[in-house]
Image: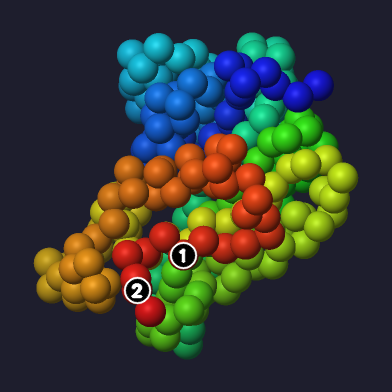
Amino acid sequence: MPATDDHRVALVTGASRGIGRAVAERLAADGCSLALGYGQDAGAAEEVVAAVEGLGSRAVPVQADVTDPAAVAALFDAAEEAFGGVDVVVHAAARMSLSPLAEFDLEELERMLRTNVLGTFVVSQQAARRVRCGGAVVNFSSSVIGRVLPGYTGYAASKAAVEAMTFVLAHELRGRDITVNAIAPGPTATDMFLEGKSPEQVEFFANASPLERLGTPEDIANAVAFLVGPSGHWINGQALRANGGLN
């Protein structure tokens, strides 16, 4: 059954940090109950639970490897057991490894592809089976797909696969009033983005946008909230470039 207007349930992966945490807190502020999927950091996940509860909502943290079908099914089970169903799925868990193609360590490439491609497929598969009518699914792509950035070949390829899955799934869910979209952030001030970058590199990326700054996790969370809310429900099968005008 569809959720009532005052009780929507959102499941967010990668919810213990960065964009995933910002999304969880924004959706909690909008009145959603939250199932918070996280990888390893239980302490950080509990901090998000506290933040969600401080916003007047409810949350349950669940450790889940997004590449493990049984673990992801258990994450959805926990959401249904705690709150009665799932209306919104935001798959924010990701991995980014950078290297020129000729030098890329293939074992690391495989790990990244498992998280970004297989993980998106596994989460989307459960979402396709379980999201209630009228709901929304948001995957995470990247604005690097539209740019020529040496060192980003593997990461961009993984995110191009995410967009392909997103577009097809939107059509496969015909008749259920469920939207499926991708958010493609530009450079965003998260630990994953900033790791290993010099101040000069950070300044380069900040100045690439005509707004002359990095995005914030809250910027991206606001875009997600629009897509999964009633105002964004006519947008379906799209990739939203949330990047401050980056080309």
Q: Position of residue 139 (x, y in %)?
A: 59, 51
- Residue depicted at x 40% and y 12%: 56
The residue lying toward the viewer, choosing from 24 and 2, is 2
Q: Is residue 70 left or right of residue 97?
A: right
Q: Is residue 170 among what the camera can see?
A: yes
Number of other residues with Cα within 10 Å of mark 1, as a class: few under 14, some 14 to 19, many 20 or more: many
Q: Position of residue 194 (x, y in %)?
A: 26, 58
Q: Earlier in the sequence, mark 1 or mark 2?
A: 1
Q: Is residue 228 left or right of residue 150?
A: right
At 18% from the left and 68% from the top, the residue drawn is 212
Which residue is labeled 1 in the image?
Answer: 241
Considering the image in quadrants, where does the C terminus appear? bottom left
Query: Count of labels shown?
Result: 2
Q: Is residue 68 visible?
A: no
State the image quarter where residue 43 is shown.
Answer: top left
The reply to whether discs 1 and 2 touch (Cβ–Cβ < 8 Å) is: yes
Judged left or right of residue 55, residue 116 is right
Q: How is the image coloured?
A: rainbow
Instruction: From the viewer's perspective, tell me whether residue 45 is left or right of residue 89.
Output: left
Residue at x 57% of width, y 73% of height: 157
In the rendered image, the residue lying farthest to the right is 175
Quadrant where the N terminus sits is: top right
Q: Nearer the viewer, residue 175 or 221?
A: 175
* Whole-percent x, y for residue 89 in the image: 62, 38
Q: Could you tell me residue 163's position as x and y percent? A: 63, 65
Between 146 and 96, which is closer to the camera in this rendering?
Answer: 146
**In the rendered image of this protein, does residue 226 appear above or below residue 130?**
below
Distance (Cα) linking label 1 and label 2: 9 Å
Q: Please tell me whether mark 2 sits on a helix, a strand or a loop.
A: loop
Label 2 Cα crowd, 10 Å radius (few <14 / some 14-19 / many 20+): many
Disc 2: which residue: 246
Q: Nearer the viewer, residue 13 or 84?
A: 84
